[in-house]
Amino acid sequence: MSLDIPTQSHDTLEMVDCGVKQARDVFEGLVDLAGHFLTKHQYYASSVCAQIAADYACIRHPGLFVSPQLEKLLCTIGAKFIRESAQLPNQHRTAQKLKPTHVLHVLTYAKPIGGDTRFVYRWIQMDGARSHSVVITGLQVDEVPTILSDAVVHTGGKIYRIDRTVTNPIQRAQALRDISNCADLIVLHSYPQDTVPVIAFANKGALPPVVNVTHADQVFWVGVSISDVFAHLREGGCRLAEERRGIERERYAFLPIPLTPSPRILSRSEAKKQIGLPEDSILILSIARAMKYKPISGPSFLDVITPVVEKHKKAVLLVIGPESSEQWEAVKQKTQGRIKALGTMSETRVYYEAADIYVDSFPFSSNTSLLEAAGYGLPLVSYFPFSAQTEVLGAGAPGIDGTLIKVTDDHTYRGMISRLIEDLEFRQQMGESTRRNVLEVHNGYVWDRHLQTLYAKAFSTHSKISSLTMSTNYEHTGELDVLLNRLYPHFSLTGAIEQYVKPLPLWLRFRILSKMLKIDRTFSFSLFLPDWLAVRVNPYMRGWRKFPGVSWWMNRPYKATN
């Protein structure tokens, strides 16, 4: 069932935003620094600076969704250091093969919370006739979720934790390349800024086909140059990849997010009782990471939805993801406790079963949560006041595009939620229609057909040269770039430097950070000290930043120099 919602005009963002330009200057400075070390044959230092650059661009959007210069640099490191395994290639692999026997899934992290891990274990469960293995490239603290490891073991595959044996990114890339020899298809589910797979697969050699799952199609990527096929989850991601990454349409395949049916364990009234709600309450649910509710322009999620809860005294809004804060406490008091932020949860099933209506996160949509809610037969409502240029920030996926109630102004948004609260028949009709459409596409025969098409395309396009040209300019500053850049306006390089530079030998730390002073000065000079001494002097080193002129110098914007 398709529902046409009237829209109203809205104020557009001011297009001139210096934040994008500043971020681009910093990013290009980091890439230039990585290039400097590359020309000096200091490959380890170059790989670390390249990783910091990718981290920065992914979070502090620089008006780029791909960097040919960074791709070329990483591939140069890979071609220099990554050797073919002495072991013979997988004996099952042949040029005529159209279906893999053993699939290797590459993840940066396998976390218990988030859509990435669910995507992988459901893929494995729904394609259990093949052997599937998983390799983790990042420095993961948590244990691998049991549901993922069980799915892998059930198919005769293995979990590889290369993060437990090596920390050097080049060594991790070599370990990944060696492990890939066991497979005849590689699937990248890695974080978009993870440089290890790019270094590992820079030299095609006897490499099997590489599929890149574009689960983060709205941010900067690395890995365009080493991927044969891109598995897109929605049409908007395809358009962005073609226009802003230079990827040809013939290298695309669609793969809907895999879902498994969600049969009820509890009735809605039983689930409400279990979470402490009255049986006659109307539960409005929303689930996403906290950053997806953070305002970037105009009204916030709470500004838009709070009047609905105030109007309907039996309505309750529970939001899983954000932690309670001053803003959340204020609306909680204003609505007599009927709006609550519950923080992060690993098990959310009882909340889906208790819910009557599901509302998408705003201003940043969470498609995985929308699809999960659809599986429980909930009507879906999404508020998106931005232009069509920013479609990748909004909701959209096969199966929900025709039934999702998507509005572009706050008046209509509140009106549609109010109608769902008041009209039980309409609520049930929209929920059931959404559930049926989503499961038809994201589970069973239709999903498997998409998967088989993806496998066939991966082998048929294998080893074709990427069309990404090093001279192409992908820079742009439009509404999408401004919105993405405003997600983390105060982000600095401190965390990335701490993560990637601190483990290096002291002499290499000094060499990198002395050059980094031209780009960013927010890192702590305690990085030069042993851990036991850094703990003692850190409070004093923070204090000296408060002297007149020091704070200004530390936070002065980076300016690229010719």
Image: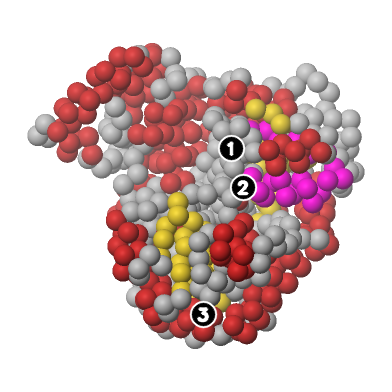
| Between discs 3 and 2, the one toward the N terminus | 2
Residue drawn at x 64%, y 35% is 144
Quadrant including the N terminus: bottom right
Can residue 80 be found in the magenta stretch?
A: no
Per the model, the C-alpha gap separating discs 3 and 2 is 32 Å
Classify residue 334 by image quadrant.
bottom left
Above or below, comparing residue 318 to residue 19 in the picture: below
Q: Which mark is residue 421?
A: 3
Which is more toward the observer, 324 or 70?
324
Classify residue 227 by image quadrant.
top right
Looking at the image, what colour scheme do you see? secondary structure
Residue drawn at x 48%, y 19% is 42
Q: Is residue 478 left or right of residue 177?
A: left
| Between discs 3 and 1, the one toward the N terminus | 1
Can residue 123 be found in the magenta stretch?
A: yes
Q: Which residue is mark 2?
A: 116
Residue interval drawn in magenta: 116-136
